[in-house]
């Protein structure tokens, strides 16, 4: 019996987003098209692994645990999203016209804007996780899941403008069905955390609003500067949404 593309997409998503060897090749175009619907699910799995490691090293202190789990995330994903963030920051920060944006995106070197963006995002994630301390394991699962939802909606809302040959092009064909299924995973994760008493309604709402605002701002800038999306832009959107959700949780949780 042949597995339908909507289910094959889960394995394709893990292959696309992580360095974990899940096999499954070759993938059909329909499998890649459904991969985006499973991005948040894969994110939740990554967050669960990071949360488990946090609990193992927690006795060393919140700052150490935060640093170790963020480093683990980089290892599991091959710094996939961070690479997109750096390229996006260089392109949007260093280009004055649309043509130059795409030239910089193709350059494998990291410039000043990209390096600064990486430092800010990594420091912010470590600092916020350390600030959340006992709530960090739950925050890791929720933010890793939630932050991978905005890119799906951006795929639905904006055209993909990278030239042929892009690794992300087959995946970036997401439509409303993929976005709806993709949105189911963070909804279930937030609801489960709330039901377990690990998250208040205000905290959940704050995280959702922050992620949505990050998506809207990114989408506006990407459309205004480049006319649409690239794979690097999607990675940048995930990083910004993750930081926004962590910041919102830390602000609402307070003391």
Image (tube, rainbow, N blue to C red):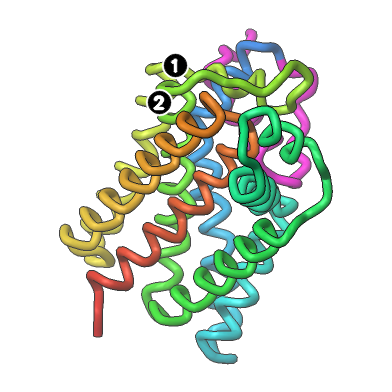
Q: Which residue is mark 1?
A: 175
Q: Does the magenta-highlighted stretch encompass residue 18?
A: yes
- Label 2 Cα neighbours within 10 Å, binned few <14 / some 14-19 / many ≥20: many
Q: Could you tell me which residue is drawn at 16 percent across and 58 percent down?
A: 201
202 displayed left or right of 72: left
Secondary structure at numbered mark 1: loop
Q: Is residue 102 above or below residue 242?
A: above
Q: Which residue is mark 2?
A: 179
Q: Dot 1: few (<14), some (14–19), or many (≥20) neighbours within 10 Å? A: some
Quadrant position of residue 168: top right
What segment carries the magenta color?
1-27
Q: Relative to residue 79, is residue 59 depicted above or below?
A: below
Q: Which residue is at a point 64% across and 62% down the rendered structure image?
A: 118
Residue 204: assigned label? none
Q: Is the Cβ of the residue at disc 2 closer than 8 Å to that at disc 1? A: yes
Q: As displayed, is residue 229 above or below residue 44?
A: above
Q: Residue furthest top?
A: 1
């Amino acid at each position: 019996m042949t597995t339908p593309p909507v289910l094959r997409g889960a394995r394709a998503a893990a292959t696309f987003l992580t360095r974990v060897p899940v096999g499954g090749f070759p993938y059909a175009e329909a499998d890649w098209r459904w991969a985006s619907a499973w991005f948040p699910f894969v994110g939740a799995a990554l967050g669960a692994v990071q949360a488990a490691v946090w609990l193992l090293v927690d006795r060393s202190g919140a700052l150490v645990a935060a640093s170790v789990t963020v480093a683990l995330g980089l290892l599991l994903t091959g710094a996939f999203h961070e690479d997109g963030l750096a390229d996006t920051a260089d392109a949007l920060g260093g280009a004055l016209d649309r043509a130059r944006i795409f030239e910089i995106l193709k350059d494998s070197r990291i410039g000043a804007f990209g390096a600064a963006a990486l430092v800010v995002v990594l420091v912010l994630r470590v600092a916020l996780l350390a600030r959340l301390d006992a709530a960090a394991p739950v925050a890791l699962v929720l933010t890793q899941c939630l932050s991978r939802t905005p890119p799906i909606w951006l795929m639905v809302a904006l055209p993909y403008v990278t030239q042929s040959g892009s690794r992300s092009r087959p995946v970036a064909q997401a439509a409303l069905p993929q976005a709806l299924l993709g949105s189911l995973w963070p909804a279930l994760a937030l609801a489960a955390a709330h039901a377990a008493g690990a998250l208040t309604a205000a905290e959940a709402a704050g995280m959702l609003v922050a992620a949505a605002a990050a998506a809207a701002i990114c989408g506006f800038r990407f459309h205004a500067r480049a006319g649409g999306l690239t794979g690097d832009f999607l990675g940048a959107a995930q990083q910004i949404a993750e930081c926004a959700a962590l910041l919102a949780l830390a602000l609402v949780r307070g003391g």
